[in-house]
Amino acid sequence: MTAIEVNGLRKSHQGFEAVRGVSFEVAEGEIFALLGRNGAGKTTTIEVLAGFQRAGGGSVRVLGHDPYAERAAVRPRTGIMLQEAGFFPELTVAQTVDAWRGFTDAPRPRDEALELAGLTGRSGTRVRQLSGGEKRRLDLALALLGRPDVLFLDEPTTGMDPQARAATWTVIRDLAATGTTILLTTHYLEEAQRLASSMAIMDEGRIVASGGMAETLAARGGRVAFRLPAHVRTDELPLPVTVADGLAVCRAPDPDLAAQTLLTWAAERGLRLEGLEVRAATLEDLFLELAPDARSAEGARPAENARSTEDAR
Amino acid sequence: MSLAATYRLGTRLFWRDKAMLFGSVVTPVGLAVGMPVLMRHVTQDGVANATAIFHSTIAILLAITAFMNIVVALTSRRDQLVLKRLRSTRLTDGQILAGQIAGTATQTVGLILLCAVTVRFAADVPFPPDPLGFAAVVVAGSAVLSLLGAAYTAAVPRAELAAAYTMPVFLLAGVSAGAMGPIPLPSWLRPVLDLLPTTAVVDAVRTGDLLVPFLVLAGWAVAGLAAVRLWFRWEPRRS
């Protein structure tokens, strides 16, 4: 069954069209990654799906309902981790969770929520003393309180240390395994590749690639890279390559076969292909290809800028 | 029940914010108790003057503890995206605001009653002759001022400006209720100031006449509800 249905969604902010006709579907129990550089329209899309903003055009259905017009029907069954949202700094972690339990039907016990988010040891700490990653985990704890059927995670692991990130991945996978539908955005492409079974890449308000993660990547082929041996010209090689800084890169639908061809060719000539590396296409390859400015935008981007950039668009 | 949950949270946060407590509890209570005590002991007609000034300071309590407090609380929660987070729960918009308004109004009623009891013993200000009427108008006034504060947040661009933006309201409420002393006002201004919700409460307490003040408060309540519906902002301005 389809949990999330987006059809020709459009949304403008003050004359700027942030989302320009986006369509995708997320099946029940699926983890779906919405990717794109800053300002691509991801957060706007999530805000419409979560019912904070009305769709400007097209239609959106979450669990069969319009999330804006029928918020009361959708909210009890969704959990939302906003990209940025405040807490009451004076409350402790436990008090925050308790307050939110009061806003939730049949909430998880406080300790269970804290354990899921890996915050058990911090329950007595005031929220303002938490690190950025810990606040993110508290965010997750609150989003999970109502045992939602659909979970929206806008950059869920930003600011987390590697252990916390890995723990969060496990939680997300376990939730999906028990039937929770998860839509996430992330700037960590490895995270998306590991977690999501489907994805869409957005650029300038449109979807530029989408589909099953494994199929999409398999279709992109892979690459073989090696140091170009001295005195070898690229046109002598049996396969076309591009060379940058002495590193030859050969893109091929079947990178294993390409590597064999290249190694056989080298062996016949008594050459070594130093630094040989064979790999299937990664999401990052695909992403950089489709959103060419992404590398510069990805750099050392402080988390705060993400929102203002997105808002400014 | 979710309204009860937001009410409890609003109440807890009211007493948790130390910086705000000084402004919204210590200062107005100090004025509402201190000025009558002063009047009682330094003026000739002590009891009458103390009673008059106490009635006037109720306007200050309403303007600060109800109005200013909720404006500051809601704008800072709006700007820190706490309101947005609350909206990501099952709570309806109405429950979130009603819980906050009820919480602020309750604290205001409590403080006004506390002051009434304190000045009874510290400055011989008599208890109101109609305790039920007094309680009713204090409750209605606190609720209306809290509601108006919630509506007023739409006019406050940023949380840092909240206190500054409520200052004129506080001055207007204080002057028109006579809490700032006898200030000569043009004659045409008087009837206008009498229409302020704070003045309505003070008039009701002073004269015991409830009908007109309740009509004035009802008018403000309708205006406040309409303003909240039309203009309340749940998120900071995108700029």
Image (spheres, coloured by chain):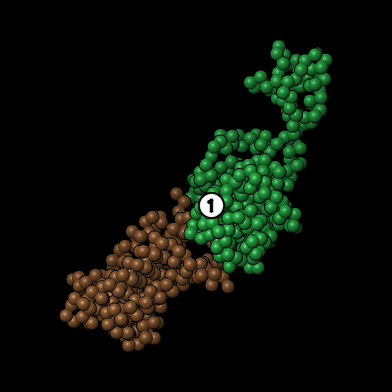
Q: Is residue B8 left or right of A166 when viewed as pictured?
A: left
Residue A278: x %, y % from top left: 75, 29
Pointer 1 chain: A
| Residue beneath the point at 56% across and 42% down | A38
Of residues A148 and A118, the one drawn nearer to the viewer in this rendering:
A118
| Residue beneath the point at 48% across and 67% down | B12
What residue did someone put label 1 on? A130
Total residue callouts: 1
In the picture, which chain is green? A
Q: Is residue A30 left or right of B211 when viewed as pictured?
A: right
Q: Write down the colour of chain B.
A: brown
Label 1 packing within 10 angstroms: few (<14), some (14-19), many (20+): some
Q: Is residue A264 left or right of B142 when viewed as pictured?
A: right
Q: Residue furthest top?
A: A231
Instruction: Identify residue type, mark 1.
Output: Leu
Name the quarter where the N terminus of chain A is drawn: bottom right
